[in-house]
Amino acid sequence: MLHWVLADVDLPDEILEMLNNRCELHILARGGVSDEKFARAQGLLTYGHPIITGAFMDRMPNLKVISNFGVGVDHIDLPAAKQRGIPVGNTPNMLDGATADMTFAMLMVAARNIVIGDRFARSAAFTHYDPRILIGYEVHGTTLGIIGMGNIGRQVARRASGFDMNILYHNRKPDPKAEAELGATYASRNDLLAQSDFVTLNVPLTDETRNMIGRDQLKRMKKTAILVNLARGGVVDHDALAEALENKWIAAAALDVTEPEPLPRDHPLLAMDNAIIAPHLGSATRQTRLAMGQRTVDNLLAGLSGKPLITAVV
């Protein structure tokens, strides 16, 4: 007998193939998921970061496991899941390299005006080479400030070393191992913001990190600095960031994540040339997404069978 599984949105073919002949899958986004189907559901696969509350879990009295596609689980009420004895799985240590690549890609794109340049090169206004336009900022030999020297932050630091960057980092406490391995220097958050030419955010979204970059922090940064966020949108106060970019408190920002996601179509950030916004592509490589899909399915099947999850959050 197949396990009943709910998923929030349509899943890619690779994951569907992994679930084939193992689960009866029902997609919430299609509608038509009745109370009866909720009651029969034994597994929940979260792919598109839906909000999962305790009340939502209570609609599924037979729920055995929640398997999340991705590392961040700030959209799932973990205490509620723990209280109900429902294990929650995620996919850590699989997207570190891809996300670090994307961090550096966004940093370079913002520094060298690549998005603006692409639009200009495609337009009728580009009639001749003009060395006076779109003057950007060099990356090599500058100072990079990494807020969050976890697995992804370490990978970002390794890439920065290839550009001969001076690396500052901020964590809750110093990390001597990271300093020895990566040549990074611990700094307070305020000192890091004041001294860095580029600031990357590589932290999870928690009560402590929500809106950790607001008006006060942005005003501490260099006017030539560039902010790069590959963490979660809620780590940055977007209204404050729009104000900072409009008033030239900082030079530019590159965001792979926003809150909400997507931003309202009339949000001022969307109209700013010095704001680069990508649609949450940090882990979007074929290799990484395939590995994440496999771990998501493996966690799901383990939970459905009453076995320990391979990577469990609770």
Image: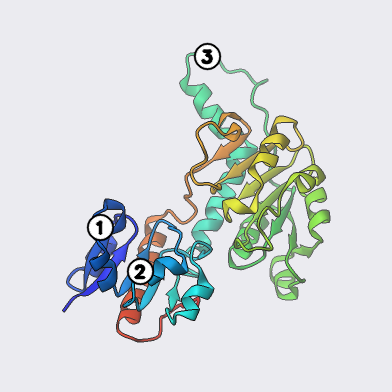
Numbered tag placed on residue 13 in the rendering = 1
What is the x, y in percent for residue 186? 79, 65
Looking at the picture, tell me which residue is in the foreground, 139 or 53.
53
Q: Mark 2 or mark 3, which is nearer the start of the sequence?
A: 2
At mark 3, the secondary structure is: loop
What is the x, y in percent for residue 217? 77, 48
- Place residue 61 in its image quadrant: bottom left
Q: Mark 1 or mark 2, which is nearer the start of the sequence?
A: 1
Numbered tag placed on residue 59 in the rendering = 2
Amino acid at circle 2: Arg
At mark 1, the secondary structure is: helix
Q: In the rendered view, does 47 fall on the left or right side of 147?
A: left
Amino acid at circle 3: Ala
Q: Residue at x 40, y 65 (%)?
A: 56
Looking at the rendered image, the quarter that the N terminus falls into is: bottom left
What is the x, y in percent for residue 144? 72, 52
Q: Is residue 47 visible?
A: yes
Q: Is residue 11 visible?
A: no
Disc 2/disc 1 C-alpha distance (Å) = 28 Å
Q: Mark 3 or mark 1, which is nearer the start of the sequence?
A: 1
Give the label, 3 or 2, closer to the camera: 2
Label 3 sits on residue: 125
Give the label, 2 or 1, closer to the camera: 2
